[in-house]
Image (cartoon, grey):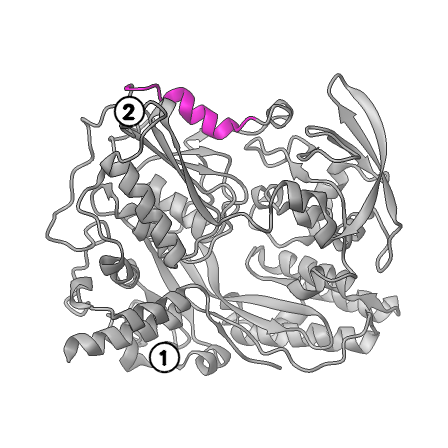
Amino acid sequence: MVVEMITHVLIVLLLALLTVPHATMAQFSIKHTLDIDEQMNALYAVLNVTVSTAFVTYNTTMQEIESTEAVQAVLQDIEEGHQNKTHDEFSFMLNQMLQNLYQDAHFHVEVTEEATLGENYQYLDLCLTWLEQGTTMPAGLVNTCQTDYADIGDLIVDINGITPEIMFERLRATIPHENTFLLQGLPVSWLVRTDFLAMFGVVPWGSAPQNIPVTLRRSGNILTYANVPLVTHSNRTSSSINNEDGEDFVSYQLLENSSTAVFTLNECIYDETFTSVLTEFWNKVLTNEDENEDGDILAFKTVVLDLRKNIGGDATVIPAFLKYLDIPPYSLFQVEQRTSPLLCDLMPMLCDRAFLSQFGIVTDNNASQVLNDELYQVSSQVIGLLLGAQVVDEVQTNKKFPVTTTTSSGQKSNFFVLTSGTTFSSAHMFAMVVQDNGIGRVVGTPTGSILPMHGNLVRVPVPHTNLTLILTTSLTAKDESHAGGGHNDVNVIPDQVVGTTFEDVQSSLDPQLQWVLDQVQPNDIDTGTAAPSPSSSSPISTLPTSTSSALPSPSMITLTGAARHVVSCILSLTIMTWSF
């Protein structure tokens, strides 16, 4: 009976902490443009829900936020501009305001996906990617697919007279971000979409020509000129060549010549597909079941986790993957949650102090964990309990991969994590856990998030528009036992910074993976210096051990098949509803 009760409350608390509530789309008449009154109503709808619900505004009044330079600039634009705006133009104006206010990449306004896939949104038929070098500014803008208009590796000189330098500065001004590495890792489809092209100044708002002149610099410093068409999403060359829409979010490859196994995770989704591929991967690595063309049994001595395209998601993938590594207990992260009236309406359990106390979450105003009557803290021990209980039964392994001990200079490792500016949110936290706990070496370019960072998102439709406001209601920070302390560090700086050059793109070279392979020669790394093995008596021994008697052990929690299905849906960002 006790076990069943704990199982039930675990599921409910997971729903509370790891869900993204979503507002019901109100039934407004959506016009092509917004008049002044509609702009003003939409602005104040955004400001009101921000003040009442966002973590960063728990002690802020409407008068205080209204008096900021960022909001005054928008009010002046609306009141003195006396002109209608397209939904796209209005969205960038709101995002510039949010960036100036909060510098929070999760906290932003976005166009609904249905709108961007429709006929009204067109795309410049190129594959544009910033050259990430590990510095705050990219080394250039390059085309990465072969088309009728451009070759792979062509550098962009200008698009209708707008240079990459101007484009990047306008991204910095208008796209909410915590560091510029995120901007360098923006999705390929964004940079060529007509709303972004209008923001760059390449095309006018609300209309665009059929073709756009582009100046390219080819190898040998040769300039070439092309008129590149605008096409619908389904007709994009980059979509078919790069397989953006059909790429599996989880996969692996076994590189027999270097005894290296590469696990690629492009999104943090904890579901049956993830656990199936993960189990298959580790079975091959740990039992040496794979054979080469000659029938020789392979021994994999190096493992690479590729998070370079991972924009985040469900943090349960972290303990699920690390469970297969022979490592000591490690630190996770802690969460501070705001319990606003809106969130309490969406998630009543987050405001139920008796319920929360079952997990050692203290909400008493006199306790140190409670910052005020709206804020309380969820410790890393509780986070470890909730995440660990999900994988204790679902991820079974009797054999672990022996990780070699890394030195203070980051030498001698057989576990690597690849990162880029696209590595964001939960993927950023994954890399952080690996680096801060000395589990492996991080290789690539800096991540697109920082810690502390805001999360536990609420999605709210903006009235009279095709826009959605995504606001943040919690703060995720390092556990104090992390290297560097709790709130002091920013983004993950790789142990080895490896950028991408113009020559890399031209030759289709993967410079980050190649760097790892250059370090790992066959039989070069042995497993004789394994990290200390955790106690076999602990079912999730790689998670932090709690000293609080109020916390049940994950071994006490038995999740039935039905419960696991519910939790799987919850951790895949189940949507809740609310509207203005």
Q: Which amino acid type is shown beneath numbered disc 1? A: Met
Left or right of 135 on screen, residue 143:
right
Q: Residue 161 in the image: x percent, y percent?
A: 86, 38
Q: Residue 211 in the image: x percent, y percent?
A: 87, 45
Rendered-image quadrant of the C terminus: bottom right
Residue numbers of the magenta segment? 509-523
Per the image, is 518 magenta? yes
Q: Residue 88 in the image: x percent, y percent?
A: 76, 61
User: Secondary structure beneath disc 2?
Assistant: loop
Which residue is located at x 41 percent, y 49 percent?
429
Q: Residue 8 in the image: x percent, y percent?
A: 27, 77
Q: Is 106 located above or below residue 16 in the figure?
A: above
Find residue 296 and name its label.
2
Q: Which amino acid type is shown beneath numbered disc 2? A: Asp
C-alpha gap between disc 2 and disc 1: 56 Å
Left or right of 464 on screen, residue 186:
left
Left or right of 512 on screen, residue 144:
right
